[in-house]
Image (cartoon, rainbow, N blue to C red):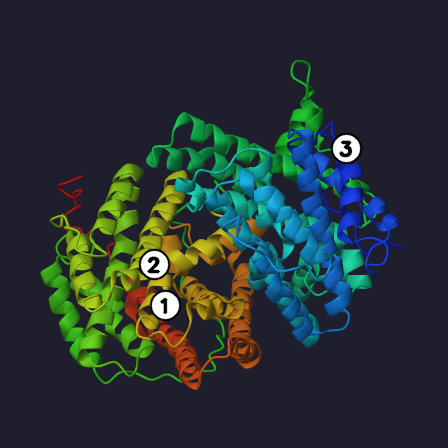
Amino acid sequence: MTQPFELPHFYLPHPARLNPHVDEARAHATAWAREMGMLEGSGVWEQADLDAHDYGLLCAYTHPDCDGPALSLITDWYVWVFFFDDHFLEMFKRTQDRHGGKAHLDRLPLFMPLDPAAPVPAPRNPVEAGLADLWARTVPAMSADWRRRFAVATEHLLNESLWELSNINEGRIANPVEYIEMRRKVGGAPWSAGLVEYATAEVPAAVAGSRPLRVLMETFSDAVHLRNDLFSYQREVEDEGELSNGVLVLETFFGCTTQQAADIVGDVLTSRLHQFEHTAFTEVPAVALEKGLTPAEVVAIGAYAKGLQDWQSGGHEWHLRSSRYMNKGARSDAPWQSLSGPGTSAADVGALLAGAGAERLRAYTHVPFRKVGPSVIPDIRMPFPLELSPALDGARRHLLEWSGRIGFLSEGVWDEDKLASCDLPLCAAGLDPDATQDQLDLASDWLAFGTYGDDYYPLVYGHRRDLAAARLTTARLSACMPLDSEPVLPPANAMERALIDLWARTTAGMTPDERRPLKSAIETMTEAWVWELSNQIQNRVPDPVDYLEMRRATFGSHLTLGLSRAGHGPAVPPEVYRSGPVRSLENAAIDYACLLNDIFSYQKEIEFEGEIHNAVLVVQNFFGIDYPTALPVVQDLMNQRMRQFEHVVAHELPVVYDEFDLSEEARTIMRGYVTDLQNWMAGILNWHRNVARYKDEYLSGRVHGFLPYRSPALPALL
């Protein structure tokens, strides 16, 4: 069969190595699969299928250093996960039996109890039998923290298969942002990362949830999945009718040829691996120091990171050899792998620099403060009506008084003119058109805190290139939000005074458990400002995937959603908010607003502030294109996020309501939450269209950076 495209060049700086226990793992996997009922008589595999797939070889390449028993156990896990995938395809995808698929998936978590001594049901099929056996053999060697994380990753891997099945049922191809997020869970690479820990060393619990370790796992995941999409396009798209494939997603989104889409997927894959390396060498050492990890814990993280690198190279080698995939014309080596120390030819060095080096360096070559002219505002789709709170004028008067009293107008970052140019009460009035005067005053103050902080960090700490002081400020802001009755430090600057005041007014009637998610949302925002500052100091334009995910945090979206949910009460179970469709709904709304802001703020950020965190610039840099070419890409992505929002409301939320058997009260609350998000998007668009903050005539007449009459000093306690 003719391949639909030529495979792109793959970035593979680490050569694959083969575990010497490969034959032992192969033999064990065959005996185990037969014992679990996965072979003859299963209706899914025969012995010839297992032999052709050669999962023993996959695991021997991806885990080259573990001993024989560990390799056999890991191989059994991969036999199980691939059998699950093929079993789900045959039993539920081909028949489009969503209800049967859900019933099948609902039972599987029962076979992964966090307490190893807890009883499990009697298995009804080979998938359940395999999972019960593997869980019992694996968890005694691992900590409770690892068991919890691995169980969650396994459940995501299983449950998000329903998302794939829903897309097949509806004949719908995801958009790129939605696809990459969901593919991580469906594709199972976070699950694979858990087995890397089993083979190498556990990640210390103190940093397992930190951004650097999360980025290591996510970049690893994205690269694994995108590589698989390239090799499996022919089988998945042309044979199985699969719609969840990155090449198909980009081919559809950009309206380009299959070859062009494959080349773009290859570029994104390379960019994710560059991000992995950047995080491993810059962010991981910093968080290890910040958390005070022991030498043994630092060594464990290093072994884990090396294990993820081994998986990338070994997984690629297996794709070259497995009968599951199209691999004609794929190269098993990279141009720089022939480098061998003394005597290396200039041509080899040139290949190294011309390949990955040029792509990597492009992220650091942006020239700030370039003249870009007025931002061009394209057609923006907004299907929801705008409403404004009648308390708007009162909120404007309140915010001016509060900002002066709190100190926002006396630190050299803002003055009354700059505050007026933001008109944050106009934004708040659109976000919550039913707000009372007190509610709108409070919402306006929160917006002022977030906007002021977003301006303060790059101006004060960026100019000084003082990342350490920014981290200390972030830690102090966290201490301004007591969960119970902890003492609060005396405020050292306007941000701390503002947050102490806002926290007291907002959480007065909350329990510690109700305050915790709100505090986490604010910490997510302030820590994201430090991430932006780190990039600014390095003059590093982030890659598109990392940017879009972090943009949600820097925009303060988690804070807004947390405040919206705070009054919903217990009628809506927390599991509903954690479900894939609700997360997809929220992320679609957030991305729409973030991309909207980037379109309006392009001139302000690029020309007047020397900023690098803007989606239009990120697209320009990543694809090597100009502003007029990049703008429609961002516009299209933004409008796609709006369509995704509408799709979830129309097709996916009703299924969630039924699956969780929500009461009518809970359904009414969720419908109100959808309306809140619609108001949020409509209000943000109206605000951007009307405020002076982003307009050329205001920007051109304003002195930028610090106010001309003073340069802010660092807080006294720093």
**Of 283 and 150, which appears nearest the observer?**
150
Instruction: Give SS at disc 3.
Output: helix
Residue 35 image offset from top left, x and y in percent: 78, 48
| Residue appearing at x 48%, y 34% in the figure | 301
The residue indicated by pointer 1 is 561
Q: Residues within 10 Å of mark 2 (few under 14, many from 20)?
A: some
- The amino acid pointed to by label 1 is Leu
* Quadrant of residue 460 within the rendered picture: top left
Q: Position of residue 421 (x, y in %)?
A: 25, 67
The answer to whether residue 323 is above or below residue 199 is below
Of helix, strand and loop, which one carries label 1?
Answer: helix
Q: Is residue 83 left or right of residue 52?
A: left
Residue occupied by mark 2: 521
Q: Nearer the viewer, residue 238 or 565?
A: 565
Disc 3 marks a residue whose amino acid type is: Glu
Residue 489, position as x, y percentages in the image:
14, 48
Which of marks 2 and 1 precedes in the sequence?
A: 2
